[in-house]
Every structure is written in structure tokens, then in C-alpha cells.
Amino acid sequence: MNILEAIKNRRSVRTFDGTDLSRNDAEKILNFAAKTGNPYGIPIEWRVLHAKEHGLSSPVIVGCDTYIAGKLRRVPHAEEAFGYTFEKVVLFAETIGVGTTWIAGTMNRDAFEKAMELSDGEVMPCVSPLGYPAKKMSLRESMMRKGIKADDRFPFGALFCDGSFDKPLTKEKAGDVAPALEAVRLAPSAVNRQPWRVVLTGDKAHFYEKRSRGYDGGAWDIQKIDLGIALCHFESAAKELGFGTRFGISDPGLAAPADTVYTASFGFGKA
Ligand SMILES: Cc1cc2nc3c(=O)[nH]c(=O)nc-3n(C[C@H](O)[C@H](O)[C@H](O)COP(=O)(O)O)c2cc1C
């Protein structure tokens, strides 16, 4: 399975078949996580944790006792760096048949943070179960998916703009890079809010965060994690499509709608 397929196939898995994660799969995932960096150069420490050993639980997860969690220093761009790297791990897990769900809220956080031996100045933004998807979703899971409209995404033209925010981008105009933007559109986000917006100017894709009502982007901004996920999907897909990419943080100074703030850009091109 390649990355574009993994992006299309991935969904949050909350009902597992009860089989323990194999030692081999756990090692593969940990090794992958350990060698995966992010464009911000922020290091992240990963651990695979066993629910029974550490008293971990999540009310939305059934049939899985193994989790992965990561911790990092609470520094500028920690959220985007975590989002980017953890999503790489999530997509890798998908390619080897291991199901995941990003979890920021629905867990006994204190127990997870204790298991991670979190110290002052560190943060453990999210965890994920690691296991083998059950053949059938639990009723709770399917109700939850309906409640947050987990299978829906905003249309292409509502998320991506052509040169300026007032001009929706079409797939035709995006041309060869359209599948990389489509990969962004399919990404997971907290409560499926899809806060990413991208303005394409020539060979640059500028990423913005459209803050949802009630989010002020304060000391810790979970929607920046979603932006990190979007950056991961764009770069991974663009590379697979044969583009070279260059990451940068350089605000192009475009007029942006209310509550929409610049995050980062990718230059892209084919040799
Ligand atoms: C940063 C982040 C935090 C999330 N936190 C939770 C959570 O606490 N509990 C949960 O059940 N799902 C959580 N999710 C999963 C989203 O609800 C899910 O990705 C979204 O509804 C889209 O569904 P999909 O992943 O199946 O495509 C989170 C996702 C992200 C990206």
C-alpha cells in the first residue's frame, strides 16, 4: 500500500478484534516513529504502552489494550510538529494493517501522562490505540461517527483557493498537484473540524488555520495539530506524485478572512 492509498483507506478505528498487537508490529511502529522527524526539527519521544500495566483506558475504544503516545517540549510549533510526525506514524500503521485513532480528549489523561513520565515543560498532546480492526464497528462507534459526521469532508473549493482567499481553486486549475490537496482534504482533525485552508500561488502552497468559534489559538492550540497533519498529508502525497518540496515559514501577506492565520508553506516543483 502506498501513501496515497493509506490516506484514502485510513479512518479512525475504535472497535478492535481483541487480539494483542504483535511484538513485531509494535517494534516496526516504534522504530518508524523514532526515525521520523518533522520540518520544525522538534524531537519527540515515543512509547508503546500497555493498558493493564499502567491503568490506561479510553471510553471510546473497545477490544484494544495497546497504545502509542508521544511527548515533547512545550516550545513554539510543538503542535504542528506533533501533528506532522504522529500522522506519519498513523499512516505507517495503516500500511501494515494496524488501526489507530487520534485521541486528545477521550482518555484517562492523568494515567497516560504518568506512564509517559511527563516532566515540567513537556506535553503529551495525543495518544492512539494500536490494534487490529474488528470486522464490525460497535454501535457506539457508528453512532459517534454519525454525530461528528466523520465520513464527511468540506468540498475542494471550500478549502483551497487560487491565488487569493476570494477565489476557490478547482481541481483542473490545481493540475498535477490536485491529488496532494485532495490528500489534505481527507485528513483527520479534532471533532472533524477540518481547519486547514490552502492558497496556491504559482508553485507555492500556503497553509492557514481557520480557527473554529471558541478557539482563540491561546497557549495550546489543538487546531495547530490538525495543521501539522495537513502538512504531513500534502508533503507525503506530493513526494509520491514526484514533486520535490521545500518547507518554509514565510507569510506571503495575503489578505485573510477573520480568524484565519498563516501557518507555513510548501514550495513544490518537478525536476
Ligand atoms: C488532534 C485530534 C484529536 C482527536 N481527539 C479525539 C478524541 O479525543 N476522541 C475520539 O474519539 N476521536 C478523536 N479524534 C478523531 C476525530 O474525531 C476523527 O479524526 C474525525 O472525526 C474524522 O474521522 P476519521 O478519522 O475516521 O476520518 C481526534 C482527531 C484529531 C486529529
Image (cartoon, rainbow, N blue to C red):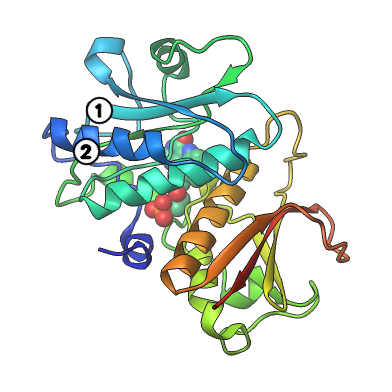
Depicted 122 relative to depicted 131: above or below:
above
Mark 1 is on which residue type? Answer: Thr
Which quadrant would residue 201 be assigned to in this image? bottom right
240 over 226 or under it: above or below: below
In the image, residue 260 lies at what x, y percent? 78, 55
| Amino acid marked by disc 2 | Gly
Q: Residue at x 58, y 56 (%)?
A: 194
The local secondary structure at tag 1 comes to strand
For mark 2, does the 10 Å Cα neighbourhood hold few (<14), some (14 to 19), or many (20 or more) residues?
many
Q: Is residue 115 above or below residue 17?
A: above
Residue 23, image x, y percentages? 15, 30
- For label 1, the residue is 66
Neighbor class of circle 1 (other Cα within 10 Å; few <14, some 14-19, many 20+) is some
Q: Which mark is residue 131?
A: 2
The residues bearing labels 1 and 2 have C-alpha atoms spaced at a distance of: 7 Å
* Residue depicted at 31% across the width and 33% down the height: 30
Can you see residue 73? yes
Among numbered discs 1 and 2, the one appearing first in the sequence: 1
